[in-house]
Structures are given as C-alpha cells and as structure tokens.
Amino acid sequence: LVGCPSEHTNNFYRFMDKLFELDLTGKIIKFFNCYLVKGECLVKDDLWIRNGIILDGLAIFFSEKAMPDILIDVGGNIISPGLIDVQVNGAYGYDFSNPNHDIDDACTQIAERLPQTGVTAFCPTIITSCQELYPKLLSGYRKYISKPNCSKMLGVHLEGAFISKDCAGMHPVHYIMQFGIDPVKTISEVYGPNLNNVKMITIA
C-alpha cells in the first residue's frame, strides 16, 4: 500500500517517477479521489490499472477477490488519456525550424516538459523554410531517440513549403513553392530523398 502526497504537484511527480522505477508487473494500481473523462463529461470515479490495462474494479474484486496493491490519491485532479500534439513548432525557447538550435537538445528539453501539459506524444513541426535547410534539419531529427518518462516523438511534421500564398499566415511567402508538373520529384528535391522520419506533411 502506497500513499501519494498529491497535495503538492512537485511531490506528486517525484512520487510517480519513483513508482515507475519499481517492477509493477501484475500489480493492481488504483487511482482514487479523481475525475475521469467519460464521453463528454468529467465523472468522479476510481481508475484501476494492471500491466498497463484499465480494469473494471468491481469485476476484478468479485472474479479474483483481488484488491489494489497500490493506492494513489490524485487529490481531486483529472485523469485523462494522454494528448497527441501533431504541431509543435517549438517551445521553452526552442524553435524546431531554427538550424542554429541543437535538435537533440531541443527535442529532449521539450519532450521532458510536455507531459506536464498532458501531451504524451508530439510531432516537431518545421514551417516553410528555404530549400537548403530541409535536408539538414531532417537529418538531425533522424538521430533523436525518445527517452523514458518523456513525451514520445512520433516523427516530423513538415508544414510547408507547399501551401497557398494567399493564406500563408506566419509562413515566409518568398519560400512557398509550387509542385510543378512532377510533384513526387519536386518533393524529393525540396525535402531530400530520405523521409523515413516524416509522419505528416501539410499541403494547402
């Protein structure tokens, strides 16, 4: 039985870090004093988990006569599914489109802090840039490896350069390009031949 000092956010994070260092295989964890997202409502309820799978607490109690091994007081806060942010242009002083920023350091710092906002996975996003920058930036992202207890990098989101000049927003208009008669060839020429770590391209 483990009690959680959930009244202090920093203590809660430290507690969870220590908890996940343990071997929790087969252990039933019960989060209580919390609100869960059900449909479009927040409902005050408990959350039971074992081996990463959400359980029906009553069913487990009656079928296995099992009780939680670990109790965690969430302090009246909300437990929700982790959010996926497919457009993170940068954060915390880092810009994913800036070739002067160390990409590994930028991804590491942002991935470490995003879970505090509820984001558990993200796509670093490169806005419309000069053609010469894309291969350089993309090669840097290919070297990054997601780390434990951080938001996972799903892959790069290329937001441009094939967008409308009439709706450019913050994108530098002079870098916006057209596909031409051979879009596949143009994409390869602009982004480079290796797009293995690209998960999303915005075309408008």
Image (cartoon, rainbow, N blue to C red):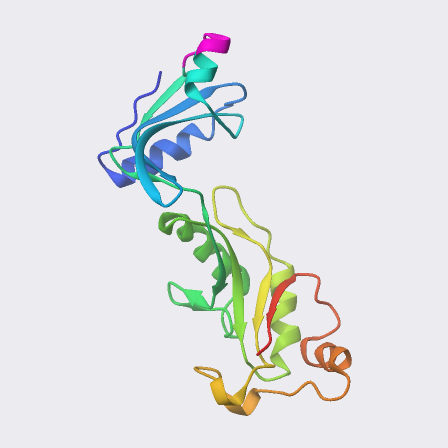
In the rendered image, which quarter is residue 159 located in? Answer: bottom right
The one of 55 and 6 positioned closer to us in this rendering: 55
Q: Residue at x 56, y 88 (%)?
A: 175
Q: Which residues are magenta?
A: 62-67
Please give left or right for residue 47 compared with residue 5 in the image: right
Q: Does 179 appear in magenta?
A: no
Residue 180 at what x, y percent from top left? 72, 89
Which quadrant of the rendered structure holds the N terminus? top left
Q: Residue at position x 46%, y 16% from top?
A: 59
Q: Is residue 63 magenta?
A: yes
Q: Is residue 159 left or right of residue 196?
A: left
Q: Residue furthest left?
A: 7
Instruction: Please determine whether, in this image, residue 104 is positioned above or below residue 21.
Output: below
Q: Quadrant of residue 79?
A: top left
Pick out the residue farthest to the bottom: 174
Write the residue at 71% across / 62% down.
Answer: 196
| Residue 130 locus on image (x, y percent) | 59, 84
Q: Is residue 133 left or right of residue 84?
A: right
- Residue at 76 percent across and 88 percent down: it is 181
The C terminus sits in image quarter: bottom right
Closer to the camera in the image, 63 or 6: 63
In this rendering, the answer to whether 196 lies above or below 172 is above
Number of labels in the image equals 0
Q: Position of residue 75 (x, y in %)?
A: 25, 33
Q: Is residue 72 above or below residue 150?
A: above
